[in-house]
Image (tube, grey):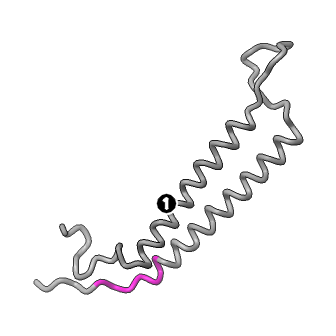
Amino acid sequence: MEPLPAPPRPEAERLLRRAVAGAAAALVVVGGWMAWEALHRPDVGASFYGKGRAYTPSYWGPFLAFCVVALGFVVYIFARALRRLQAGELRPEGRRVGEPR
């Protein structure tokens, strides 16, 4: 049986470009919103220390750091996949899906 030729994948590149743009936009929007809220509502913090304590840590710093790192990782993964697709690495020349290399 002859191997099938690899189809061009303009739709895959378009989808990855949109995924990169969407994740980057989410990173900017979520980071901006959280920074805005942290500046205007610094009192959102841990209540497990009890009320009236001298120190109650804020949740904004760790929450913002987690979201920025997580969304930044998503942007990185999508951008890397887009670069690999454009370089031709992810185009299985003449192979069927699931066929071993």
Q: Is residue 68 magenta?
A: no
Q: Which residue is mark 1?
A: 77
Q: Is residue 61 above or below residue 68?
A: above
The quarter of the image holding the N terminus is bottom left
Magenta part of the chain: 6-12
Question: Helix, strand or loop at disc 1?
Answer: helix
Q: Position of residue 53 (x, y in %)?
A: 83, 13
Which quadrant would residue 81 be assigned to in this image?
Answer: bottom left
Which amino acid type is shown beneath numbered disc 1? Ile
Q: Residue at x 35, y 74 (%)?
A: 89
Q: Is residue 11 magenta?
A: yes
The mark tally for this picture is 1
- Whether residue 99 sits left or right of residue 14 in the image: it is left
Q: Residue at x 59, y 55 (%)?
A: 72
Q: Position of residue 59 (x, y in %)?
A: 73, 33
Q: Residue at x 74, y 24 (%)?
A: 46
The quarter of the image holding the C terminus is bottom left
How many residues crowd around disc 1 within 10 Å: few (fewer than 14), some, or many (20 or more)?
A: few
Q: Position of residue 65 (x, y in %)?
A: 66, 43
Q: Residue at x 85, y 30 (%)?
A: 43
